[in-house]
Structures are given as structure tokens and as C-alpha cells.
Amino acid sequence: PPPPPPPPPPPFQAEDGIRDEASCLVGSEMCIRDRALAHPARLMIVDELAEHGERCVCELTELVGTDMSTVSRHLSQLKNAGLLVDEKRGTMVYYRLRVKCLTNFFSCVEAVLEQNAEEHRQLFSLQST
């Protein structure tokens, strides 16, 4: 008899704002990066590092306004996604962006959001006339 078919993939687990299975292949590099940037605290961390170069965990904890273990988890996700690098100096760990082009990403997202808002305003004004 032929071998049994492979087991089905695990069910999709929506996490941190990922929309649906079609938009994210579970386990893919793109999905990992998407998920890493899908949380407001992680976006805040990336924005801070883009603006100021590097920060220690304690500074980022103060910025995010939550406990150090939560910030460390966020930093770990960003690092595992390849977005951050860290450097230990004595007892302190400093994080910085792995590549500077990530800052262009935020400008691009902002431009898309502004364009979408403008198109919605125009559509709304057409519907109300």
C-alpha cells in the first residue's frame, strides 16, 4: 500500500495582529519579521533605536513603561527576526538596529497610511454629496 499522507499543518495561530493564514506562511522568515513588527511596544522600540542609535534594556524598559521581562521578550523577538543586534558591556546589554534601512520602512508605512486616509476622505466626500 502507498505511504500515508503527511499530517496536516498545525492550525494557524493569529498572534500580535497577523491577519490570517493567507497573509503569513507559518514559519517563514517574512512571517517572523511581520510578527516582530506587529506589536505597538516593538514598533516603539524600533522607532527609538532608529532615532537614537542604541539603547540599553533599562532605557527601553522606561520608554515602553512595562516590566523588564516583557521588554526583554520583545527585544528577543526583534533580535530573532534579524532586526536588532545586541552587545553586552559589563552587566548592561545594548541594542541597536541591525540595518538602518528599517527607518525607511516607517516613512513608507506612514506615506501609505496618509494616502489611504486621503482616499477615504475623498470617497466619503463623494458619497455625502
Image: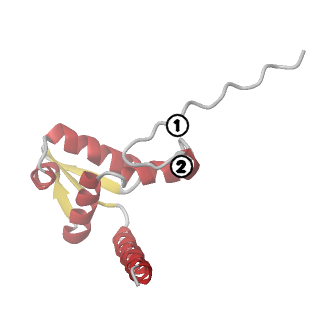
Could you tell me if the residues under marks 2 and 1 are in contact, i.e. CB atoms within 8 Å?
yes
Q: Tell how many labels.
A: 2
Q: Nearer the viewer, residue 127 or 18?
A: 127
- Image position, residue 121 (x, y; %): 37, 79
Which residue is located at x 54 percent, y 42 percent? Answer: 26
- Label 2 sits on a secondary structure element that is loop
The residue carrying pointer 1 sits among few (fewer than 14), some (14 to 19) or many (20 or more) residues within 10 Å by Cα, namely few
- Label 1 sits on a secondary structure element that is loop
- The residue that disc 1 covers is 12
Which residue is located at x 90 percent, y 15 percent? Answer: 1
Depicted 3 relative to depicted 53: above or below? above
Which residue is located at x 44 percent, y 54 percent? Answer: 34
Kind of residue at disc 1: Phe
Kind of residue at disc 2: Cys
CA distance separating discs 2 and 1: 9 Å
- Image position, residue 28 (x, y; %): 55, 47
- Image position, residue 89 (x, y; %): 17, 50
Q: How is the image coloured?
A: secondary structure
Q: Is residue 78 left or right of residue 87?
A: right
Q: Is residue 41 left or right of residue 24?
A: left
Q: Report the residue that reaches farthest toward the front.
A: 129
Q: Nearer the viewer, residue 47 or 76?
A: 47
Q: Residue 24: which disc?
A: 2
Q: Report the residue that reaches farthest toward the right.
A: 1
Nearer the N terminus, badge 2 or badge 1? 1
Q: Is residue 6 left or right of residue 67?
A: right
The residue carrying pointer 2 sits among few (fewer than 14), some (14 to 19) or many (20 or more) residues within 10 Å by Cα, namely some
- Image position, residue 30 (x, y; %): 51, 53
